[in-house]
Amino acid sequence: NTLIVLDEPAELEKKLCQLRQFTENAADYFLADSELYAFIEQFAHCSVSTSSQTAEPFFKDPYPVLFGITPPSFLTQLRDGNKKTPELIEHTLKEISYLLHDNYSVTLSFNNEGERERFNEICMDKRIDSLTRCPSVIGSISGGFICPELSYAFLSDQEIFGRTPVRRSRKKFKYSAPLYTVFDIQIGDYVVHAQYGIGRYQGIQHILHDGKQQEMMVIEYANKGVLYVPLIHSNLVRRYIGCGAGETPKLDVLGSNSWMRKRKSVEEAVFDLAAEFLDIQAARKTLSGTQFKPDTPWEREFEAAFIYEETADQLSAIHSVKSDMESTRPMDRLICGDVGYGKTEVAIRAAFKAVMNGKQVAILVPTTILAQQHYKVFSERMADYPVNVEMLSRFRTNAQQRDIIKAANAGSIDILIGTHRLIQHDVRFKDLGLVIIDEEQRFGVRHKEQLKRMRRMVDVLTMTATPIPRTLYLALVGARDMSTINTPPEDRLPVHTYVTSYDDTVIQQAIQREMNREGQVFFVHNRVKSIEKIQNKLQKIVPEARFGIAHGQMHEKELSAIMDLFRAGEIDVLVCTTIIESGLDIPNANTIIIDRADLIGLADLYQLRGRVGRFKHRAYAYMLVPAYKITSEQASKRLDAIETHQDLGAGFQIAMRDLEIRGAGNIIGEQQHGHISAVGFDLYCKLLKNAIAQLKGETIPQPPDVQVKLGFDAIIPSSYIASENQRLAIYSRLQEITNISQIDELHKELDDIYGDPPVPVEVLLDVVRIKLLAAEKRISSVEVKENKLLIKQNEFFLTDSSQKHYRIRHNSELEVTNSIKTILKELSSYDII
């Protein structure tokens, strides 16, 4: 009963002819055209096409059925153009109001609540209040329609804002885990138990405990000591990260006081450091910065013209940035999100807000290529508004640079995008209000000192995909404002990453595979001296490909011309250095081959990989290493990390892995080295974060300290989640839960990923519910003994008001479920004492 649907048969025929050219020498391995057509004829089949071309040769007797809707001229006018100016949006609103005057019923469709609010605000600003009373819905539709017979119109945002939004899928129930818990623990790793100190992880074993088989983490300590940790308490265990690369810590002794003495010493030290951080923050708050005004109608219209639907993370980051800008103190916020996740749009809106308040904006980027790309993006987004955008880089002549600097100093340039040339002494903005720094870690020490001076005077917004250790550390402990963007664009796929020996055949097949789907390739060779030799070699391997070279020592006009050709699709393979690393966005380039990947840093490898896979196509990254040369231990760890962390949004994991490989020693100065080594980076950050919160007078939500003994199976069976590390992660999260909504969120996530949770998992979640409810009632323990429910409050056992004893049974899954309901109901009946 299979139905075969041919999408655009004429295009399929064209593609088939192209593929035949590549399979001529292996024709015996593929179906002949006649065999393919005969195979299709065996089944029910149809074709869909936007053209009236015949569906032959896929059909013997094609019978065309034409579908098509020609929208009324009114809708055609409303849909004219992909992007609307404020004037056109106002015209559209008036046209819709005329429908209401003609007694039409009008329903409006928006992609999200934010769009509906913007629409209402624009209507109020334009004094077309009648439109705000139209019924509206939140949903996705490609276009609206009008039915004159019924005097009814259904209009989408395509008609209102003149755009077809590109929607981004939500990662369901995304859990924002603390950054210091992101690593899987492997057998043999050094770990830190919060109460017992540093040991070596030896895996998971089944141990008989309280009459039941339980999964336990096994940790080896000094003098052959062994600690068994129930998985339900795995949140107390963290992987050890020291100060130096490959640092081997000393194992603690179980039963001694040495660990608690070390921990107390570190707690005292971080308390002093926390006070120092807060003094710096307090001093910053006393500075008087620019207080930007709330959003103007132009800002709302500008945001409505964004062709994508904003993700929840983006909207949250935008809200935080605007709140910072509208406060009296200078902003210093970090936007951390994976490559291609929409950080640039956050920066664009911040820049537009600054310009609307009469301030100038400086956008600092690490490379000339990225400067050119940002210049193009910012110019296009602001083309309909009186905003003067310019670029200062070596792509400009000396005379042009002088004119641009003169204009910036005079205040006639609103947004100036450039490399480190922007922070040289001759560039003096007339009224600078905002500095945006893209990939701050790429700038040198001298440049960073100049950036520090900027921070004292103006609002600063920093963007990064892989935060450097110090930036990550400051964010971890709450000493720096940070927003994260975790949601990937719709249809984004992880980049398949391979670490392999240098091989001509691998290179040839990778390039040809990409060209066969009309894509483009980056070939990274980070040595200018031999880059032409490599290009000549590649030309012999793949003679049909068109090659180009790009590196930082080229003349600016030549480099700019090559990049323009590559963007236009006139170059198939760009042989380049790591100059392409930062921010370059070419959606058609979906394969990257990196030569001598063993010589490139982990964060750089991650950024390079991010140059591909920026659209909906599957992308590939090949990390090439010498065939007959042993790589160093650190290089092997870097390559293992880049191959392991292929998931979308792996920037934090990469940053933490880089931190582990290189050590945490260069983060906060020599005096803290010993403290980090003593307890590990993870626990150190947690202690410091707690100290900062304590000094601020903030209450840190703590998991409930309630003893619950029910006698039921409350576990995650391996038959439900096979991976030990994944079970560990879930157990750890359960112990960090501080409110009921987090339990519901986790339940939805488990159901979404692993399927309907079995009863033991449901019981495990309900145990946490019981703990939260009991803690709220100041109940210290909930226990089932001899089928009776015993509840202890303030050291006294309580019974229900009618003096009944609940009979708690667990002979079947149904009895267990009903018993849990009984316990929760009984707990709810008690008052808080």
Image: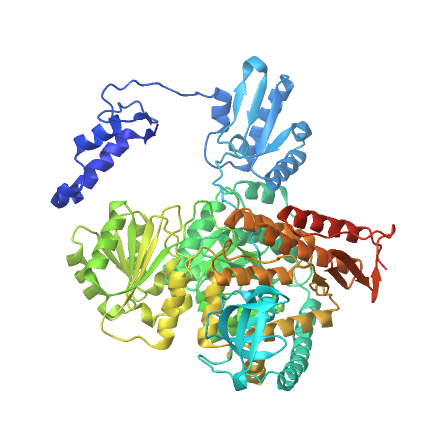
> In this rendering, would 94 be left or right of 488?
right
Tell me if 771 is positioned left or right of 302 in this view: right
Viewer-nearest residue: 691 or 106: 691
* Image coordinates for residue 443, horizontal then vertical, percent: 45, 69
The figure's colour scheme reads rainbow
Query: In this rendering, is residue 145 above or below 226?
Result: above
The location of residue 614, given as percent across then percent down, is 40, 51
Q: Residue furthest left?
A: 25
Task: Please name the residue shown 58% across and 85% down the image.
Answer: 253
Q: Quadrant of residue 473?
A: bottom right
Vertically, is 81 above or below 284? above
Viewer-proximal residue among 27 and 760? 760
Q: Look at the image and tell me in which quarter the C terminus lies.
A: bottom right
Lateral position of residue 261 relative to residue 67, left or right: right
- Label count reads 0
Of 777 and 207, nearer the camera is 207
* Image coordinates for residue 30, horizontal then vertical, percent: 18, 40
The residue at the far top in this view is: 149
Residue 676, percent across and down? 56, 80
| Residue 287 seen in render | yes
| Residue 280 versus residue 549 in the image, above or below | below
Instruction: Identify the image quadrant of the N terminus.
Output: top left
Residue 426 in view of the camera: no
* Left or right, 411 with reference to 789: left
At a point 31% along the width and 30% down the height, the residue shown is 8
